[in-house]
Amino acid sequence: MVYNTALSIVQQEEDAEDVTQEVFVQVYQSIEGFKRESKFSTWLYRITLSKAMDHERRKKRKKRFAFVKSLFGEGSEVVVDPPDFNHPGVSLDNKEKAAILFKAMESLPDNQRMAFVLNKVEGLSYQEISEVMETTVSAVESLLHRAKTNLRKELKTFYDQLKE
Amino acid sequence: MKEKKDIERTIEETLNSLDGIRRAEANPFLFTRIQARLDRSRSGFERLAQIAGKPAFAFVLLLLVVGTNVAVMWKGSADASAVKREQTQFAVADEYHLDVPALYDYETPEP
């Protein structure tokens, strides 16, 4: 659950392992603070999403910094652009399209991305997602609707470019 | 027109490509790594480092340092004013010959 969620957000196995480790350390250190106002799994998802998104933000900051450094001619460090992510749980006939979808998901705003991952990858209901994200069911519906709209735009651009 | 419909169909298929996805399983050694990390975090030094890293701890330490400085300065200024008071007292006593004469102050006439 933790590893799967982390993997779907960070899209790299090594990074997902790091995030998973951080999550369990956090759980171990904060378990006494768990007030049992929500389910344990809800709390676990929250920590996982928080750590995974923090990791993503750090990665984006590093990329931006490396880009700025390259503008000033400082450091010829190659910024590695990893190949398309293949989630091991996707069926073989869907692998290619799933890789394209995961790439498109990187462009989603944080909240939409989290809601989409929880719904499509973890299979949580709108109610469960609302508990994890501490929002209302209608807000979750709205987030998912916007996520799909944005993904359609992104995918249309991708497929149009492919045709050319 | 047909092309547009094809693209739309492909887009929908892509959006649905995660249907039936199974949970990814972590490397079996991940559990060992996590266990080792938790064992390290239980060690005294790391726990001390965790406490020292908290903002509340830094704030209390800062208050302590500032408080100590203020106390030293206060005491210093109090001492300085006490010394000044004493000096003033001596000056006044000297001027009005109020000091207690010591034995060696008396002039002994020479034979």
Image (cartoon, coloured by chain):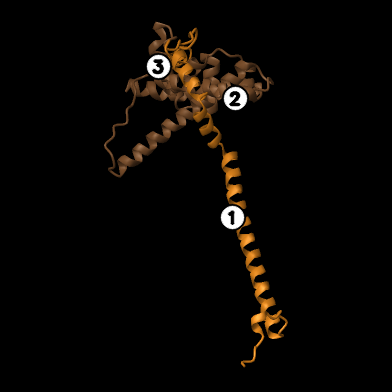
Amino acid at dot 3:
Ala
Q: Residue A26 falls in which quadrant of the image?
A: top right
> What is the CA distance from the residue labelled 2 to the residue labelled 1?
36 Å
Q: Residue A31, relative to residue B82: is it above or below?
A: above
Q: Residue furthest bottom?
A: B111
For this rendering, which residue is in front, A131 or B35?
Answer: B35
Which residue is denoted by mark 3 in the rendering? Answer: A99
Q: Residues within 10 Å of mark 2 (few under 14, many from 20)?
A: few
Q: Colour of chain A?
A: brown
Q: Residues within 10 Å of mark 3 (few under 14, many from 20)?
A: many
Instruction: Name the chain letter of the residue that bears numbered label 3.
Output: A
Q: Which callout, 2 or 3, points at the residue further toward the start of the chain?
A: 2
Residue B105 at x, y = what percent? 65, 83
Q: Residue A55, relative to residue A116: is it above or below?
A: below
Q: Secondary structure at mark 2?
A: helix
Q: Secondary structure at mark 3?
A: helix
For this rendering, which residue is in front, A85 or B52?
Answer: B52
Which residue is denoted by mark 2 in the rendering? Answer: A30
* Pair 3/1: label in front: 1
